[in-house]
Structure formats: structure tokens, C-alpha cells
Amino acid sequence: MKVTCLGAALTVTGSSFLLESNGIHILIDCGMFQGSQEIQKRNRTFHYSPGDIDYLLLTHAHIDHSGLIPKLVKEGFKGQIITSRATNELCSIMLRDSAHIQETEAEWEHKRNKRRGKKGLPPAPLYTVRDAEASMHLFKPIDYGEPIQLTPQLNARFLDAGHILGSAFIEIWDHSVSPPMKVVFSGDIGQKEQMLVSDPTAIQEADFLFMESTYGDRLHKSKEKTHRELLHAIQDAVKNHEKVITPGLCRGTHPRTDLHPEPLLP
Ligand SMILES: [Zn+2]
């Protein structure tokens, strides 16, 4: 088995891994590079041929993990995109939205070029809404814990990572070696005791673990400090006559009843 880290290196976006085993190519995540123009240049080229990829396993819907899927499909990927049901639903909104942004930015650039007297064809967007819609046909939603047989020798399982709705740790077993080898890709990892998503599942074992470490050098703030920050933000907004937009519940989502949060206001 060979694993190549394709993104989220020297920057925190563009998450993607390529796992190869006995001629099977599996991509784990296909994230967009976000940030400076220099970083965004990395979105232009895949370092593999999309048509050679057999499966894409998607940890969660955030664009830095899913945002290049329409480009992957546009450039020849025809395999299944296996992910949780909630990630499937979120991607159907977010990829279309991302495509709309790509199209709008290309239009703006074209107008800017024209204003500056530059001639030439309008710049092509990274992908279009139509590409995003086409990619949704390849999604295969699965349940947490459901056994997934990728090939006779490779199987996988998604477990709740507690990061956002639908987020998953992905476990992959390779039975072509004895004893079978287990590799785990964490995706982004959630915190415990959040109101809408479950606590991350405890992974018991792995031979190799590929783990996100974006905030690995920081300690989480205490709940009390977080509550105080929120309180101050709301008080500031009221004082300045600003609007406060808060997240609501998605369809089929219920706040956790096993938690008893402290009241925000003393
Ligand atoms: Zn994320």
C-alpha cells in the first residue's frame, strides 16, 4: 500500500490523500486550496489522472475537503463518491454554491481585464454550476458504521468525527497483506459536548493514522471564555445597532438532550 499526501501541507487547505493498493486508486478528500492567489494556483493541476481514480472517499463537506470534486469529475473521474448521508446533502448545496462563486469570479476578472485594455478570451472558471450538478450523480451516501466493500481485498467504514453534520473518520483495511493492515484518515476532528453534533467516536486501533493537526499547537479555550466572547459580541452588536445572525437547525437535526449547558447570561 502507498499513500501520497497531496494537500494541506505548508498550508491548511486543499486536503487530499491518494491511497494505492494492488492497482486500485482511492482518493480521500478532494479539497480546494483557499487563501492567497499563490495558494489558489495549486487548484489548477491534479498530480494524478482523475480518470485513473476508482473511488473518492469524502470525510466531510467543508470546501477545503470537497471543493475540487466538480473539477475532478469534469476532468474524467467516473468512480463512486462515498460519503455519509448528511455530507451528501450538504455537498449538493455547497458545491453548487462554490461553482457559482467560481463563475462570478471569472466574470469579474474578465471585466477587470477589459477595463485595463487587456484582450483575449474570458478566463475559464475552475468549474461551473453544471459541473457541480454532474458530480452529484456520482455520490453514494452510506451510514456511519456500515461496512463498505471497495474490492475483494479492501474495505472501509465511516465513523462519526463530531466536527460538522455528517463528518467522518474513515477506516480502511487492506487484506492483501497478512495480518490485514488498517489505515485511518481522521478528516477534521470535532470537540466533545457540542450542542448539535455527537462527540467524536473513539478509534481503538490503527497501523497508520493520517490526522489533521491545523490547531494542534493550541489549547482549546474554556467554555466559560467562549461564552463570554459570544456575550460581548452580542452586546457590541446591540450597542452599535448591528444585526446578529445565528445558526439554526437543519432538517432532521435536533439539539442534543444529553447535555445541560450552563446559561449564557449570569
Ligand atoms: Zn472541516
Image (cartoon, rainbow, N blue to C red):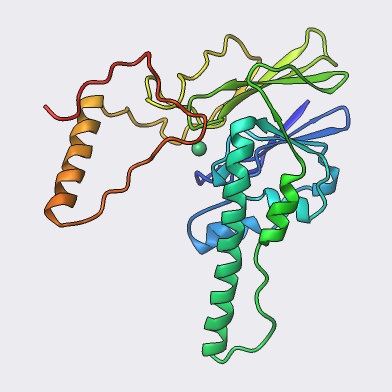
Residue 193 vs residue 2: left or right?
left
Name the quadrant of the C terminus.
Answer: top left
Looking at the image, residue 69 sits to the left or right of residue 175; the answer is left
Picture quarter containing residue 229?
Answer: top left
Q: How many marks?
A: 0
Q: Is residue 46 visible in the rendered structure shown here?
A: no
Residue 179 position within the rendered picture, expressed as x and y whole percent measured from the top left: 78, 7
Image position of 236 with respect to 206: above or below: below
Rendered location of residue 118, percent (x, y): 60, 88
Relative depth, front residue between 259 and 19: 259
- Left or right placement of residue 247 versus residue 198 in this view: left
Residue sitting at the far front: 251
Residue drawn at point x = 55 percent, y = 69 percent: 105
Q: Nearer the viewer, residue 155 or 263?
A: 263
Q: Tell me if residue 238 comes above or below residue 196 in the rendering.
A: below
Decide: is 89 above or below 113.
above
Q: Quadrant of residue 104?
A: bottom right
Residue at x 58%, y 46% (from the top left corner): 14
Q: Residue at x 68, y 53 (%)?
A: 132
x and y percent of residue 215 in the render?
41, 34
From the viewer's side, name the closer residue of 228 and 22: 228
Quarter of the image that includes the N terminus: top right
Q: Residue furthest bottom?
A: 117
Visible in this render: residue 152?
Answer: yes
Where residue 2 sits, quadrant-wise, is top right
In the image shown, does 111 or 119 lie closer to the viewer?
111
Q: Residue at x 66, y 22 (%)?
A: 143
Q: Position of residue 242 (x, y in %)?
A: 21, 56
